[in-house]
Amino acid sequence: MIRFTHVTKVFPRTGTALSDVSLNINKGEFVFLTGPSGAGKSTILKLIFLEERPTNGEVKVGNISSATARGRDVPRLRRKLGVVFQDFRLLEDRTVEANVAFALEVTGAPQSVIGPKVSRLLTQVGLGAKATSLPRELSGGEQQRVAIARALANDPQVLIADEPTGNLDDRATRGVLQLLRDINNAGTAIIMATHDLELTKREGFRVLEVNRGQLVFDSAEPNGPAKAGI
Amino acid sequence: MRLAWREALLAFRRAPVLSALSITTIAFSLFAFGLFGLVALNIRNALVQVEERVEVRAFIVDGTPAEVTSTALGDIAAFPEVLSAKMVSPEQALERARKELGEFSDVFDPGILPASIDVRMKNGHRDPATVKAVAERIRTYDFVDDVRFGEEWVEKLYRIRNLATLVGIVLGLTFASVAVIIIGSTIRMAVLARAREISVMRLVGATDGFIRSPFLIEGALKGLLGGLLALGLSALANSVISKFVFRADFFDAKFAVAGVLAGALIGLLGSAVSVGRHLRDV
């Protein structure tokens, strides 16, 4: 479903962020993307949702390829993906339900669909009772749940999470992870970047490790070409 | 589209002073245009009335035989630009002069005024150049002593009208450019202030057109309001002039609507240029 083929990404100012990365993520998988800060995790995620394009190689998500995608393909791709970040990226001047509804409104969903769907999503993430709260009135864990509800609004095939637990305490982290597991069990693939190695070991999902822009470990092929590259 | 309208209207609440400034600038640009437009319009209307009275008068040398003048009269009446040509005897000329000019009231000698051929021009042929050309052709007749057609003041009126139109266009365009720049900068600020929102919109799959639409609506609305304000100001100026100076004509409905739409277009243009440039930065 997501395929990186010999992907290199060079930024003009900061240099090489990724070097010859090839990987494949299947439908419905739960994958941890790990490695130290600056290793290239976020770059991989940005390449998936076409925030960045590879300098060399090809990124393919579904039937959209980085090599041939045009400007109008980017929104089309992003409606198939949900993205959450460490800093939640909620709109502070809108209520929880307005934040979630926003994702549906911008894709032109009719009002008759938006209301019930927002309620369902908020119930799914355990925030049904906080629909009319403002983000600043919520805890970090709750804010991340709102962000996840928003990411799920367009029924994505893949949920991309960039350090979603980075700002959360242990209890909130466990809650968010449980939520992600539930979402994954319902069939949505999850790609979660984290530098928390303990967490990746504990969960037992597939782990991709990047270091200095290279894929150095893939638990799906522990003796494969990625490992040999170390 | 509902969201786009809501966001556009919200922009007025977020920056009321800047919004008012943009609207006022557009209003003044169109008001300048409108004011000189009114001057041009009224001069044009005056010219139409004056033109209807444009006459070429060819004075005839004393003692010219009647058959010569009547043949010429037929020739002149057949000119394509000429509506009618008629002979005015010295007696008729004196009669007219006594009616129109007070100083002739106690003159009774018909020999004081020469006979003339009075020529009226067809509608559409009353501009200075055509009138002059016809006058010159009439002047070539041997029996014509002199030809008068109010050349100077007709030309002067035309010149004033052209000048008013030109000044209106130049001032209007200058103000319109300022309006485009001001609208552009308010939109730029709005784009930067909403950078977070825009990045979220992009993240959840909003198209560029969708992201642009609230800003375009905002610009067009400001332009529309500016246009309406300009129309109001022009109407006010017109009524003041009509009351205290002279009865002036106002634009017809079609022109007024076009003026307001021009405001919307200025607003749309300013925001389109700005939003296109600054969306890339967020």
Image: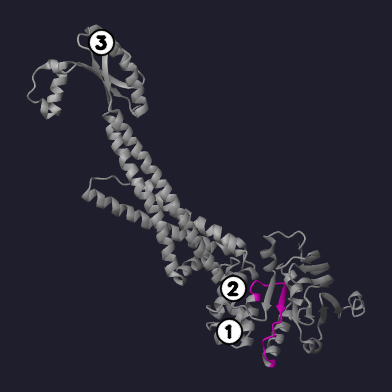
Marks 1, 2: nearer the viewer: 2
In the drawing, does residue B249 fall left or right of residue A59?
left
Left or right of A35: which side holds B168? Answer: left
Task: Using the rendered view, name the quadrant where residue A121 is placed.
Answer: bottom right
Q: Mark 2 sits on what residue?
A: B196
Q: Residue at x 13, y 22 (%)?
A: B95
Q: Chain of mark 3?
A: B
Q: Main secondary structure of the magenta part?
A: loop
A142, A108: nearer the viewer = A142
Q: Do the numbered discs 1 and 2 sit on residues whose CB atoms are within 8 Å?
A: no
Chain identity of mark 2: B
Considering the image in quadrants, where does the C terminus of chain A appear? bottom right
Work out whether disc 3 and disc 2 sit on a shared chain: yes
Q: Is residue A153 magenta?
A: yes
The mark lying in front, picked from 3 and 1, is 3
Pointer 1 residue: A128
Name the amino acid, label 3. Answer: Ser
Given the image, on which type of amino acid does mark 1 rest? Gly
Q: Residue furthest bottom?
A: A171
| Residue kind at label 2, given as amino acid type | Arg
- Quarter that holds the N terminus of chain A: bottom right
- Residue A120: % across, % down: 61, 79
First in sequence: mark 3 vs mark 2: 3
Q: Secondary structure at mark 3?
A: helix
Disc 1 from disc 2: Cα separation: 25 Å
